[in-house]
Amino acid sequence: MTLDGHEPYIIFSSDGGHHEYKAISCISYFPDGKKMISGSADKTIRRWDLQKGKEIEDAREVCEFGIIEAVGVSRDGRWVVTAGWEVKVSEVEMGIVRTFHKGKLITWIDISADSKLVVGGSIDHEGWIWRLNTGELVAGPFKFGDGLTFTIDRALRFRLSEDSRKLAVLSHGGQCRAT
């Protein structure tokens, strides 16, 4: 099945030409496997009904701050986390949306197995950990590596352990650390 809906992103070349492509930067399944969420350079977060093969249009969100770099759904299906120039957490059933962080481009997130924490990593190798239900900063900012990273992955990648007591970090240049 092909899910179509995100708008094309236009890149202009130095010779005056341009190229259009659909820059879908991130996807995540809901735990039931019947829905999916995607984020894009068109500044939208879209939810998809996989049984019908189409977008759930009334669930679409527009981010005024630019491209969506990361999306995630908690294992219990209660929380949707989106990241780019801000980190937003939405409680699915109640529709409550909280903005946890603004001002740094967050390009990677991970949600703890117990659906209590979210970790985010920025383009300049900083990381933060927040409580999903309150937005309280638990740890950070903490720094890994040096400088800005302009590669395909563009930032740190994090993975919380199953018990949320350890954090593995993969940074530019193939460095891997656990704390």
Image (cartoon, rainbow, N blue to C red):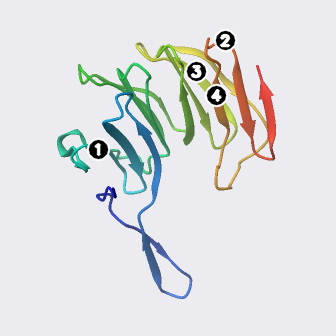
Q: Position of residue 73 (x, y in %)?
A: 42, 29
Q: Is residue 100 left or right of residue 147?
A: left
Which residue is labeled 3 in the image?
129
In front: label 3 or label 2:
2
Ranked by sequence position, the earlier of labels 3 and 2 is 3
Count every numbered label the image shows and give the total.
Answer: 4
Q: Is residue 173 above or below residue 165?
A: below
Which residue is labeled 4 in the image?
159
Amino acid type indicated by mark 1? Leu
In front: label 3 or label 1:
1
Which residue is labeled 1 in the image?
50
Q: SS at mark 4?
A: strand
Ranked by sequence position, the earlier of labels 3 and 1 is 1
Q: SS at mark 2?
A: loop
Which residue is labeled 2 in the image?
165
Residue at image x 73%, y 36%?
A: 170
Q: Quadrant of residue 178?
A: top right
Q: Are marks 4 and 1 in contact (CB under 8 Å)?
A: no
Residue at image x 68%, y 41%?
A: 124
The Cα atoms of the two marked residues, 1 and 2, are separated by 34 Å
In front: label 4 or label 1:
1
Residue at image x 45%, y 60%?
A: 23
Amino acid type indicated by mark 4? Arg
Quadrant into which the N terminus falls: bottom left
In the depicted view, which residue is nearer to us: 100 or 81?
81
The Cα atoms of the two marked residues, 3 and 1, are separated by 31 Å
Residue at image x 33%, y 58%?
A: 6
Q: Is residue 18 above or below residue 91?
A: below
In the depicted view, which residue is nearer to us: 80 or 32?
32
The Cα atoms of the two marked residues, 4 and 2, are separated by 11 Å
Callout 2 crowding tier (Cα within 10 Å): few <14, some 14–19, many ≥20: few
Ranked by sequence position, the earlier of labels 4 and 2 is 4
